[in-house]
Amino acid sequence: MSSSNTSAPSTKTSVAAISILASGSMAVAKFVVGIAIGSLALISEALHSSIDLVATIITWAVVRVSDQPADAEHHYGHGKFESVSALGIIALLYVLAGGILVQAYSHLREGTPPPSISAIPFVVLVIDIGVNLWRARALHRAARDTKSQALAADALHFASDVMGSTAVIVGLVLAGFGFWWGDAAAAIAVAVMIALLGLRMARETVETLLDRAPEGALEKATAVIKAVPGVVDVDRLRVRMVGATHFIDAIAKVPRTYPIDRVEDIKRRAQAAVTKTFGDADLTFTAVPVARDNESVRERIMVIARNSGLAIHHVTVHDIGGKLIVGIDLEVDGDMALDAAHDIAHELERAIREDFGEDVEVDTHIEPLEPELPWGTDAAPDRVEVIKAALTGFADGGAIHDIHNVRVRNTDAGEVVNFHCRARPSMSVIKVHESVDEIERKLRRAFPTVKRVISHAEPTRA
């Protein structure tokens, strides 16, 4: 993407620079010949080309500015400089069209003699048509590739020049056949074409300045963002163009159970999706957490606790005769007074009842929050062997076997035991958990100094 962005400015400026040379050459040729033969239509077309020359110079200067990146004063970049320059060119076109109409009316009223006819003006006009067709095609292609409004306006100018030159040829032919008014009529046709061109440019430029959404952009952006995994729906979306960049503001719904890092990943995927679709795109993604229909009771309770800034674990949920029974372990600062801790637990229980109904039964077990980095040391090897022998004895003949990788650490709160064990691969997680829990309970009863037991069950190797 960076390589295309780098080449775009050079493409626009080089095409604009070539147009300046072509506009200047053809304007001088048509003006000289028009004066020589006394053709108002040809002089009008030369003046039109002169306006195109001025417009091309402005375009060449503006695209160099519009491609500059956003800065402290222009947060959306400099793309609208192109729209402002287009308004100036439109004003010049209407001044020119008005002047041509006034002069053509004067020629018709006074019966001005027709111009002298020779092969020279026809040769100049045919060459002009060929040059303008080439320029219009090159500028249109560059405008399409770079999404430059200024280059698109310039391409439209040169396409209209083809029609203007054709009208002048028709006027000269009429004059050659004795219709004295043919030249003035051709000049009027040129003025009308210029006015119609200015009207079309004005509509497109004003729509851009008024932040009109590009055709189909809203539907396309909504579809690609909705397709991002994790996006539930798009609540609101706005699109506007600044130069070649699509600025997209999206408010999207995401599951409220998702952690922050997963929401950030959704944002990155959404930006990549709109960039792939639109090319140069800048997405502002606002994530709104919402409840999904398939949320479990446990997930809803975890969300309630997280929104209250509380740490909970071991959430148990039961349905007893149609009544919801909830048990929660709530962790609070160990130095906190009991009445303060009880108030926190009461508020959590109240929030759960507000979500599930007043008839829900909630029991909260308050326990001290474990320090993040508790102090500890490895126990002596003989102590580890004693603990390992006890674990092996408790597991003997049961579903759990092969006690290994036993570690014992001494902490301020007591001993912490970690061990690995094996079970049949076909055993359910519930059965394995119940069997390991039984071993852990026996170990704590046999060794009151053991504060915590952490086990890791593995399937039996084939």
Image: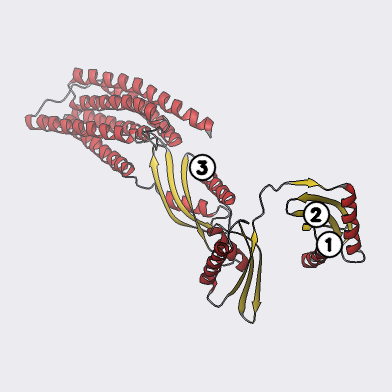
Give the vertical position of 349 relative to 376 (above or below).
Answer: below
Give the vertical position of 319 relative to 122 (above or below).
Answer: below
Residue beneath disc 1: 443
Q: Residue furthest bottom?
A: 321
Q: CA distance from mark 2 to mark 1?
A: 10 Å
Three-letter residue code for mark 1: Leu
Which of discs 3 and 2 lies nearer the camera? The answer is 2
Query: How many other residues sit within 10 Å of disc 2, few (<14), some (14-19) or many (≥20)?
Result: many
x and y percentages locating residue 392 in the rendered image: 90, 59
> At 9% from the left edge and 29% from the top edge, which residue is drawn?
111
Residue beneath disc 2: 417
Query: How many other residues sit within 10 Å of disc 1, few (<14), some (14-19) or many (≥20)?
Result: many
Query: Would you say 311 lies left or right of 437 here?
Result: left
SS category of the residue bearing label 2: strand
Pointer 3 or 2: first along the chain: 3
x and y percentages locating residue 145 in the rendered image: 46, 35
User: Is the Cβ of the residue at disc 3 closer than 8 Å to that at disc 2?
Assistant: no
Query: Would you say 209 lies left or right of 187 here?
Result: right
Three-letter residue code for mark 3: Thr
Pointer 1 or 3: first along the chain: 3
> At 17% from the left edge and 21% from the top edge, which residue is drawn?
38
Residue beneath disc 3: 275
Depth check: 102 or 222 in front? 222
Q: CA distance from mark 3 to mark 2?
A: 52 Å
Q: Is residue 63 visible?
A: yes
User: Is the Cβ of the residue at disc 2 closer than 8 Å to that at disc 1?
Assistant: yes
Total tally of numbered discs in the picture: 3
Depth check: 63 or 302 in front? 302
x and y percentages locating residue 77 in the rendered image: 40, 35
Q: CA distance from mark 1 to mark 3?
A: 58 Å
